[in-house]
Amino acid sequence: MIADRARFRHAKKLERLAGYRLSELAFSGTMLETLCSRIDYDSLDYGVREQILAFFNEFLRCDCRDSPLCGCPEKKFARSIVELRQRGLDHRQIASFLLDEYGIELFPADILSFLEESVHVLEAISDVSRLQGRDGLAKKTDDTISLIER
């Protein structure tokens, strides 16, 4: 999944703040638990703090009992990449947006690969939907594919 490739630019700062070693992967269990723990974010500079809070608000807010290790953050992240593509951003612009908005570093080639994989999965869903007589779902899937491929 694409979330497994996302690195958090400010991992070292959070590591110093937490007082223990952290993975730089944004969606690793230790990073997610650290972001949800009682860390003094006020000791970070304004830009870093705003990116961390934006990341927290966008991806880590859910009502699951196992939050943040429930899988919702990774799903929300993948969905946001697809939505950014549907809004017309290319893979380089998506990488730049993620870095500016959330402090997440992701190679544009990884984003492009993820989008290609997503199209293949959606094509399979479309084919199965047609075979099952669910033309409405097939139409929605085809529309989504066309928005990603444009």
Image (cartoon, rainbow, N blue to C red):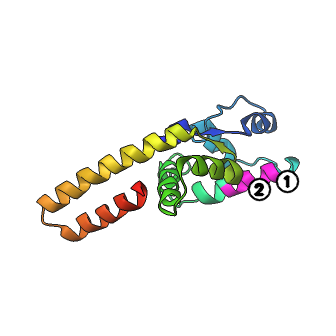
Given the image, on which type of amino acid does mark 1 rest?
Tyr
Could you tell me residue 136's position as x and y percent? 23, 71
Outermost residue toward the bottom?
Answer: 136
What's the residue at 71%, 28% (across, down)?
21
User: Looking at the image, is 145 positioned above or below residue 66?
Assistant: below
Quadrant containing the N terminus in the rendered view: top left
Q: Residues within 10 Å of mark 2 (few under 14, many from 20)?
A: some
What's the residue at 55%, 57% (across, down)?
89
Whether residue 84 sits left or right of residue 21 in the image: it is left
| Distance of label 1 from label 2 (alpha carbons) | 6 Å
Outermost residue toward the top?
Answer: 21
User: Looking at the image, is 108 positioned above or below residue 46?
Assistant: above
Magenta span: chief secondary structure: helix
Given the image, on which type of amino acid does mark 2 rest?
Glu
Q: Is residue 143 magenta?
A: no
Viewer-proximal residue among 9 and 34: 9
Q: Residues within 10 Å of mark 1 (few under 14, many from 20)?
A: few
Could you tell me residue 29's position as x and y percent? 57, 38
Span shown in magenta: 46-54
Residue 147, visible in the rendered structure: yes
Viewer-proximal residue among 147 and 13: 147
Q: Name which quarter of the figure residue 8 lies in.
A: top right
What's the residue at 64%, 53% (across, down)?
97
Residue 60, visible in the rendered structure: no
> Mark 1 — residue?
46
Per the image, label 1 sits on a secondary structure element best described as: helix
Would you say the residues marked 1 and 2 are in contact, meaning their CB atoms lie under 8 Å apart?
yes
User: Looking at the image, is 72 positioned above or below residue 138?
Assistant: above
Could you tell me residue 134's position as x and y percent? 17, 67
> Mark 2 — residue?
50
